[in-house]
Amino acid sequence: MQHVEVRGLDKHFGSFHAVKDVSFDIQKGHLIGLLGPSGGGKTSILRMLAGLESPDAGEILFHGKRVNALPPQERGIGFVFQNYALFKHMTVQENIAYGLKVQKASKTQIRERVAELVELTGLKGFEQRYPQQLSGGQRQRVAFARALAPEPQLLLLDEPFAAIDAKIRQELRSWLRELIERVGITSIFVTHDQDEAIEVADEIMVISQGQVEQKGTPWDIYKEPATPFVASFIGESTQIEHAVRLHGFDLAAQTSGTRALIRPEYVEVGRPSEFALLSATEEGVVRHLHFRGSQWLVEVQVGEQRLITYRSLEKEPLQIGDPVRVMVHRAYLYNEQRSWIAENRYKADPMSMMI
């Protein structure tokens, strides 16, 4: 049985249709990322799962039990907000213990559970401090510990790292992944940061305009996007309006109106001597170079189109204005009827150059 089942979820806010007939399942113990642009419906879905908003239509089931009518406190949910929502007048220890006191747990149970969570979240030595005496990362750890204290069956996180600076956010991603694995709790977190979702989640649901565009592992979504929106939203890409003009893809893109999305890793740029099949390449000119630490991000002009790609630091350096050869290995093609990934036909079959 699935831990969470959502069937036909729908929600309006006045005339705005925030969530449109959304359905999905989540296995027990999985960490799911709701990923998409702001205003796409991610937080509305999360709040309906929590019982903080009521759906206009649809069903929400936990372990096969319909929970639509249950108030938040009876759903077995822990909620972590992006602004921490800690009680400023309470110490770390008191904040963590709050939910247990509401449940009327014994003093012994509270003391043992708080000590366990302080250890688990790396807060030992900070128990008597107040929120204003903590860093942003420490405050967020307190928020996690407080949410986990009553031993919820489902943990919901609304952009939990949004208020934290980049370096600490990176550290907390790894920490959260390890924490969820150790606790084994089913978790759903909202984010608009694709790097965050890809790094942390077991599965990603890409949400746009109130609908689920695709659900799958980060690798599956990146490798085989189901819709043009997913292809353009996940990773970097360049859109080409007339894919039939793309060298090596003219036969695959013959349907009128077919467009292409080209990811940087689909493109190879270099000196003519670097290509075994020079006839499959096109002429290009380097327009910009961006140092990315372990590699160069290269912007190259090919005819009327500007493409981006990566180049290893181990290869001969390029300079702005250099003439180069460019090969597009594959492309994500789409039109009104369908979408698909196509390989460069010249690369796949050099004899096709003779056609």
Image: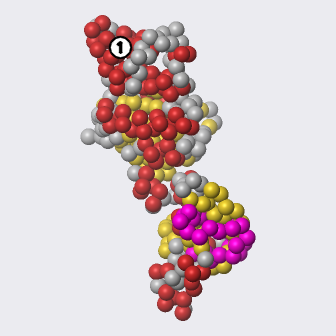
Name the quadrant of the N terminus.
top left
Q: Magenta span has 57?
A: no
| Residue type at the position of mark 1 | Leu
Q: Which residues are magenta?
A: 300-327
Point out residue 149 in the picture as x, y percentages from the top left corner: 35, 20
- Residue 127 rendering spot, x and y as whole percentages: 42, 14
The one of 105 and 121 positioned closer to us in this rendering: 121
Q: Is residue 52 above or below residue 264?
A: above
Res. 333 in view: no
Q: Secondary structure at mark 1?
A: helix
| Vertical order, 116 against 208 (above or below) | above
Residue pictured at 54% horizontal, 43% vertical: 193
Judging depth in this view, the residue of 300 and 159 nearest the camera is 300
* Location of mark 1 (residue): 100
Query: How many dots with numbers?
Result: 1
Specify whether 31 is left or right of 55: left
The residue positioned farthest toward the bottom in the image shown: 354
What is the image's colouring?
Answer: secondary structure
Residue 325 belongs to magenta span? yes
- Give coordinates of residue 289: x percent, y percent: 67, 61
Q: Residue at x 65, y 75 (%)?
A: 324
Say which quarter of the image contains residue 74. top left
- List x then y, in percent, for residue 269: 59, 71
Which quadrant would the C terminus be assigned to in this image? bottom right
Residue drawn at (45%, 21%), measured in percent from left and top? Answer: 142
- Asked if one can make out residue 25 in the rendered structure from this viewpoint, the answer is yes
